[in-house]
Amino acid sequence: MSVRYIESKKTFMLQTRNTTYQMKISDYGYLLHLYYGERMEDEDLSYLIQLQDRGFSPNPNEAGNDRTFSLDVLPQEFSSDGCCDYRLSSIEIKNGDGSYAFVGKFVKYAIYSGKYALEGLPSLRVTEQDTADTLEIWLEDKVSQLTVVLCYCVFEEKDIITRAAMVVNQSADTIYLNRLMSVTMDFMDSEYDFIHLDGRHTMERELSRSPLSYGIQTIGSFRGASSHQHNPFAVLCDRDANEDYGRCYGFSFVYSGNFVCKVEKDQYDQARIIMGIHPKHFSFQLKSGESFTAPEVVLAYSGKGLTHLSHMYHNAYRENLCRSPLAKEMRPILINSWEAAYFNFDEKKLLEIAEAAVSMGVEMFVLDDGWFGNRNSDNAALGDWVVNTEKLPGGLKGLSDKIHNMGLKFGIWIEPEMVSEDSELYRQHPDWCLQIPSRQPSRGRFQLVLDLSRADVRDYIVESISEVLDSAKIEYVKWDMNRFITDAWSSIAEKEKQGEIYHRYILGLYDIMERIILSRPQVLFCGCCGGGGRFDPGMLYYQPQIWCSDNTDAVCRLKIQYGTSFVYPISTIESHVSVCPNEQTGRYVPMKTRGVTAMDGILGYELDSTRMTDEEKQICKEQIKKYRSYYPLIAKGDYYRLTNPYSFSQYVAWEHVSKDKREALLSLVLTEKESNDAQQYVKAKGLIPDMRYQVDGLEGSFSGQLLMSAGIPVPSSLLQYEAVQYYIRAV
Ligand code: GLA
């Protein structure tokens, strides 16, 4: 079994193929964290704990005269609050007596094969290929009579450990849970860099890296969604770690709402990281006997750099996270109407776009925003999920039939979580949106957010959207969310429960996705939130692909996709070729380069195909043909970032390598061109050193070692923003 309790040492040992995680029940019953990292066969790492008298760090009462035992210094698995430990706490509760203290001590544990269940929350699943074991540890505060259950699941072959936590109120009082972190991890040193993905609308998931410094560094979202601004993912790595070298610890939160991740470097040069639901405006009422479950964090450790860390997440998310059976299949290459027509279309225009795309080899037509109610701009009709027959006289069915007659599949856009003030739904149910009494709710894109904590609102959404999806043959749905949450107040919750609304919104969202999406396994769903404002594992559980960004400029996408690739598989990143000059940046990038960049994801098109020249269509036709043949490599292979676009400006390169290493696709975009510049060489990765390979476009054959050490000359004829792709194959 990958989980063991060693009674004689009082240690818990979790082991994956290449990693070890160890904890210990210390004197007085506290659960200490001993180690996470490279696999160790030794059974007891307790000697790492060196006790010392530390002035001004308090000692628990039961330590008596022992002044060396302080929770303010010791590495813990779940930190207490209000007693002894001044560092970041895992929990904050308001007890029945008004006190804030929580001190959890070990009571019991359970080990079983398989995985713990998190009701109502997405999480990794165990597949037939996995060996997975669970450890549950109960910590109890005897005074508050509150129990915390720490859950660990070890995915042995995947080198992944998941963690979650649960709180059960066993007292007779009502208590308030103001914070419950899903993970707390202590390190006995702090020479680490903190890597995270920051950004903004149309420039999501940019890589940010900084050394730990004394005090606390924080990322998070209080926007009701995981957000464009920060992603629920962080890495702590050695200061000199790079793609191929160094210890790297990954933390990825399977949740789509408010989150926080904090790292503290303390007075003794130790580090603590916590990750969980953002405690701001969070207060969960727990009556006697009630419980609360914190979502899952997926942990991965790589002792050999960031690329390997990414591979572990890619493998686990492809195989254990995405629920859709379509996730494993080749996704249809689509053309989307948004940048082609925005709100200005009728059926004739849509059919023309589709018709022109058929000759390019496109496989699906997606009707974006504007097909329902009086939706002629973005300030009306959200909530009225009834087709606009002025634009589409035959309804969705009529359009879908015509599209299918062209040999294409058909998809639509929806935004089910929202309501426009100018809508029938809002006129009938003004209390169905989130708003605080006597305050005018703030608007975002002229729309309000529906109160998904309400069962009647959720039922309306499920019924109205199901009616639409069942009204025609619809094979793809783009599920959008175009504003963030404010005014989080529900008209049906008691005032003591208003601190639950942000989380109940997400639980409500997961409930409607469970009912709408999981009951339609044959329909491909794509997540969207003004592009990639909700690109997180929670969403990927339901929707196997997400529209990566509203920014379709191929050069900006190089950075956006680079950052995204640190944790999310390439097969989840929807990426489209659009028109040039680009509508977001005004930049001109050749059509071939737009295709090469979009092929680093789920390729699609987002332009008015009726205005394309024959030459452009021909280029796209070739792109699509190539993409189809490369798809298994791109979607199922290992991904290598060959350059860092933040520190190297001449070109951006990346590579997809098949699992058996016999095939690879190396892509490169020249981002900076000067006249008469130095010869550049791009070095491949992930090949077998003594295997011989042929490289399309180059004479002869080369050893893997040569391609990785000496590299391929970057053609000097390439001009700025031009791209080249090398298909590499073992001979
Ligand atoms: C969001 C999406 C776009 C498009 C529009 C439609 O901004 O990110 O792709 O669907 O909504 O209103």
Image (cartoon, rainbow, N blue to C red):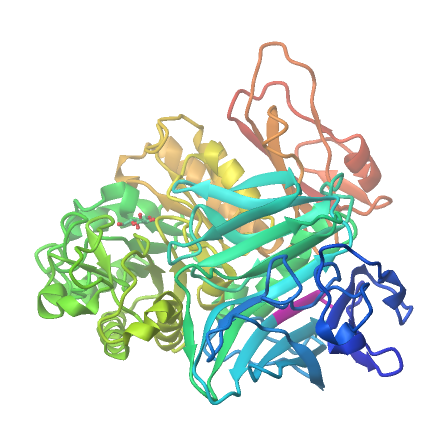
Task: Name the side, left or right, on which 427 lies relative to 154.
Answer: left
**Is 399 in front, or is 56?**
56
Residue drawn at 68 percent across, 15 percent down: 678
Residue drawn at 63 percent across, 18 percent down: 716
Residue drawn at 54 percent across, 45 percent down: 197
**Is 472 in front, or is 460?**
460
Residue 567, percent from left and from top: 59, 53
Task: Name the side, left or right, on which 55 lies relative to 169.
Answer: right
- The residue range painted magenta reads 157-163
Of the 4 image quadrants, the one containing the N terminus is bottom right
**Is 614 in front, or is 679?**
679
Residue drawn at 18 percent across, 64 percent down: 437
Q: How many marks?
A: 0
Residue 2 in view here: no
| Magenta span contains residue 280 | no
Residue 142, percent from left and from top: 62, 84
